[in-house]
Image (cartoon, rainbow, N blue to C red):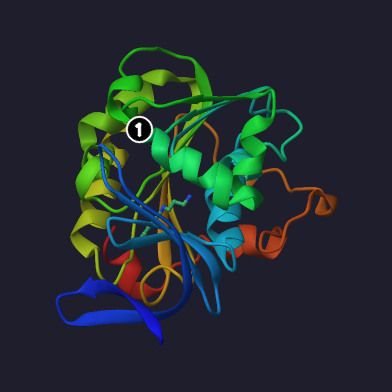
Amino acid sequence: MQLWFSERETDNINVKWKVEQTLYSKKSQYQQIDIVEFTDFGRALILDGIIQTTVYDEFIYHEMIAHIPLCIHPNPKKVLVIGGGDGGTVREVLKHESVEKVDLVEIDKEVVDAARKYLPELAGCLEDPRVTVQNVDGFKFVQEKTSYYDVVIIDSSDPIGPAVGLFAKSFYKSVHKILKEDGLFVAQTESPLFNKELITDVYTGIKEIFPVQYLYTAGVPTYSIGPWTFTLGSKRYTKEKARTLNKKIGLKYFNEDVQKGAFLLPQYIKELL
Ligand code: SPD
């Protein structure tokens, strides 16, 4: 018997993936969590029917959400990751020698536990002594500290369910407050083809809060059809003085060309900003 997983992109587009086996399936307090093995893309984390990551192409997304902001900051020491319970983003953050402390704030403990067991390539890094995992609401977490982190990375799921608040302007104001006076942050901000209004709203909001703002893209085959966007807000540092990374730290996607090219936007995306 053949098993197929179908992911809804829009009311009129579904994408189908052939499944070898289901490894884990549980309804947590927040969402339905599934870990399956796809025939071509290997193990995948699926939340409420939406694929979050696959072991085959996760490196593209996780390298891009982590290294672009961490290279713009000249000396990132304290980093906060909100969401990202699979651990992929934290794994990339830890590749930066300057980083002394990473707080992972993932609301759903069951996601972290499942990733530790079934996605060790991503979540194995959570045992690193520099990492602290807290299963609390990211929206509330950022309201409780001031001027503390050098870099904040918002590795959320789509703007439905538990992640809705992580796309609100009031949330970005709290992120501004929790960053040091020269801090910066990045958020995953969805598809420029299917989430136009969201990208415009987020970018406009960030522009009102942070003096420096950028949108950059990467093509992540697992996410939707076409490019994926990331929006960055910075209190001081600009991309022109970004550091480059030592090639020996195990990168598969990020390099100096990608670092520069990611900010080059096609016209239809520029018009959203
Ligand atoms: N459409 C799904 C987008 C998910 C983005 N975040 C995934 C988290 C991976 N660490």
Q: Position of residue 87 (x, y in %)?
A: 55, 43
Q: Which three-letter amino acid code belongs to the residue tagged 1?
A: Ile
**Name of the residue lying farthest toward the right:** 248
Quarter of the image where one finds residue 102: top right
Q: Nearest the camera: 214 or 187?
A: 187
Res 142 seen here: no
Q: Residue at x 55, y 73 (%)?
A: 41
Residue at disc 1, secondary structure:
loop
Q: In screen coordinates, is 23 left or right of 129?
A: left
Looking at the rendered structure, the number of numbered marks drawn on it comes to 1
Q: Position of residue 123 (x, y in %)?
A: 59, 43
Q: Residue at x 66, y 38 (%)?
A: 125
Q: Position of residue 104 (x, y in %)?
A: 50, 30
Name above or below for residue 223 compared with residue 141: below
Q: Residue at x 36, y 19 (%)?
A: 177
Q: Nearest the camera: 250 or 4?
A: 4
Name above or below for residue 148 compared with residue 110: above
Quarter of the image where one finds residue 134: top left
Q: Residue at x 36, y 36 (%)?
A: 108
Q: In screen coordinates, is 148 left or right of 202?
A: right
Q: Quadrant of the C terminus?
A: bottom left
Q: Residues within 10 Å of mark 1 (few under 14, many from 20)?
A: many
Locate ligand 1 by image quadrant: bottom left
Res 53 seen here: yes
Name above or below for residue 163 compared with residue 265: above
Q: Quadrant of the N terminus?
A: bottom left
Q: Label 1 belongs to which residue?
A: 107
**Name of the residue lying farthest toward the front:** 1
Does the residue tagged 1 have its C-beta within 8 Å of any atom of ligand 1?
A: no
